[in-house]
Image: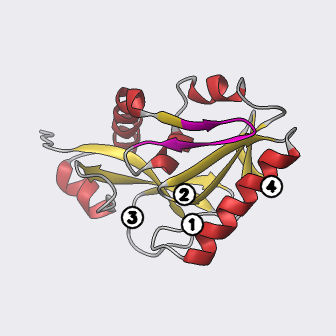
């Protein structure tokens, strides 16, 4: 019998992060791990947790995606073109794992292909490949976050959304 008193969300991490964490390849040097919550982001789900909770990897992935979809109303957009920021309760990078039309809607707000900088778990800057000033702003944002350092650093690269998923620009 499966009994859980927690919910899960997807959480982006660097692919080289150590541990027995359940993770799926995301590409661009990142993986999608899963976090318990609330509060989210404090502890990643391990394979031992999956066994103890009587979950399968597939079920964990599905529950996390469903929970993320239910929380998308908390997404906030700050600023406007050529580059804007997203806020999502401190787990902004989790949005990259969302596939509920959110990125199609955001793509309508940019020139060219949808491009993001996701330098840390709580920072997502959005622009388009057709905006040199937006790309510059996104790169500066990523550079500043990496210069400042953070325990949850993710990618120094800008990522572009293509039919197969997110790729380094």
Q: Earlier in the sequence, mark 2 or mark 1?
A: 1
- Residue 15 position (above or below residue 83): below
Tag 1 residue: 15
Q: Is residue 6 visible?
A: yes
| Location of residue 2 in the rendering, given as x and y in whole percent from the top left corner | 15, 40
Q: Report crowding for label 4: few under 14, some 14 to 19, many 20 or more residues within 10 A (C-alpha).
A: some
Kindly indicate whether the residue at mark 1 contacts the one at mark 2 (C-beta within 8 angstroms): yes
Tag 3 residue: 21
Q: Secondary structure at mark 4?
A: helix
Tag 2 residue: 31
**Mark 3 → mark 2, Cα distance in angstroms:** 10 Å
User: Residue 87 in magenta?
Assistant: yes
Kindly indicate whether the residue at mark 1 contacts the one at mark 3 (C-beta within 8 angstroms): no
Q: Residue at x 66, y 24 (%)?
A: 104
Tell whether 150 sits left or right of 51.
Answer: right
Kindly indicate whether the residue at mark 2 contacts the one at mark 3 (C-beta within 8 angstroms): no
**Mark 2 → mark 1, Cα distance in angstroms:** 5 Å
Position of the N terminus by quadrant: top left
Q: Is residue 169 visible?
A: no
| Location of residue 101 in the rendering, given as x and y in whole percent from the top left corner | 58, 23
Q: Nearer the viewer's eye, disc 1 or disc 4?
A: 4
What segment carries the magenta color? 78-88
**Mark 3 → mark 1, Cα distance in angstroms:** 11 Å
Q: Secondary structure at mark 2?
A: strand
Tag 4 residue: 136
Q: Nearer the viewer's eye, disc 4 or disc 2?
A: 4
């Amino acid at each position: 019998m499966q009994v859980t008193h927690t919910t899960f969300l997807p959480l982006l991490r660097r692919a080289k992060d150590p541990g027995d964490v359940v993770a799926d390849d995301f590409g661009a040097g990142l993986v999608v791990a899963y976090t318990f919550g609330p509060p989210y982001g404090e502890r990643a789900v391990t394979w031992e947790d999956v066994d103890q909770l009587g979950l399968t990897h597939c079920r964990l992935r599905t529950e996390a995606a469903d929970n993320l979809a239910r929380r998308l109303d908390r997404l906030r957009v700050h600023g406007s073109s050529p580059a804007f920021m997203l806020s999502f309760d401190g787990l902004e990078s989790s949005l990259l794992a969302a596939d509920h039309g959110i990125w199609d809607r955001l793509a309508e707000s940019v020139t060219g292909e949808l491009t993001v900088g996701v330098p840390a778990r709580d920072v997502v800057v959005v622009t388009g490949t057709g905006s040199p000033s937006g790309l510059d702003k996104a790169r500066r944002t990523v550079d500043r976050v990496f210069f400042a350092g953070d325990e949850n650093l993710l990618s120094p690269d800008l990522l572009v959304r293509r039919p197969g998923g997110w790729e380094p620009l």
